[in-house]
């Protein structure tokens, strides 16, 4: 559900927001949600359906999940840094 809502919100931002999307904190948060929860869907499905039998594949899947978690946390940190100090003044410009 979060993935679908993120996709819909990203589409809305792409069409309606006139400012740069690379510095838009909402866009960055939603991109992080999309990446993290899409991979988590794949990760959980692989374990639920027992697609992974050998130990090496499980270790690789867990390491990849840790890397994606780290990358998404970096994205969230960048998004927090992009939040304007005075949100009232920012909305008057639009």
Image (cartoon, rainbow, N blue to C red):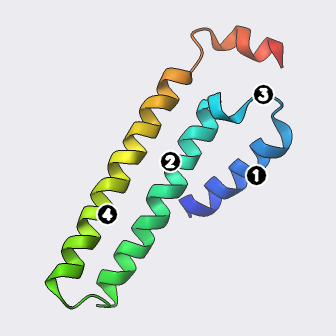
Q: What residue appears at the point 42 percent right and 75 percent down from the top-left corner?
A: 42
47 up-or-down from 59: above or below: below
Looking at the image, tell me whether mark 1 or mark 2 is earlier in sequence order: 1
Q: What residue appears at the point 52 percent right and 31 percent down from the top-left corner?
A: 79
Q: Quadrant of the C terminus?
A: top right
Q: What residue appears at the point 72 percent right and 8 percent down from the top-left corner?
A: 89
Question: Disc 4 vs disc 1: which is toward the camera?
Answer: 4
Q: Pointers 4 and 1 in contact (CB under 8 A)? A: no
Q: Quadrant of residue 92?
A: top right
Residue highlighted by disc 3: 19
- The numbered disc on residue 75 is none
| Residue furthest left as drawn | 55
8 up-or-down from 41: above or below: above
Q: Residues within 10 Å of mark 3 (few under 14, many from 20)?
A: few
Query: Marks 1/3: CA distance?
Result: 14 Å
Residue highlighted by disc 4: 64
Give the percent coordinates (x, y) of residue 64: 31, 63
Query: Marks 2/4: CA distance?
Result: 15 Å
Helix, strand or loop status at disc 3: loop
- The numbered disc on residue 11 is 1
Residue highlighted by disc 2: 32
Q: Quadrant of the N terminus?
A: bottom right
Give the percent coordinates (x, y) of residue 56: 18, 80
Helix, strand or loop status at disc 4: helix
Helix, strand or loop status at disc 2: helix
In the foreground, 81 or 63: 63
């Amino acid at each position: 559900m979060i993935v679908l809502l993120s996709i819909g919100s990203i589409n809305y931002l792409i069409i309606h927001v006139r400012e740069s999307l690379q510095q838009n904190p909402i866009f960055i948060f939603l991109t992080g949600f999309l990446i993290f929860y899409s991979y988590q869907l794949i990760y959980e499905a692989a374990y639920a359906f027992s697609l992974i039998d050998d130990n090496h594949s499980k270790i690789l899947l867990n390491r990849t999940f840790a890397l994606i978690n780290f990358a998404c946390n970096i994205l969230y940190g960048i998004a927090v840094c992009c939040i304007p100090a005075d949100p009232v003044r920012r909305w008057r410009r639009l």
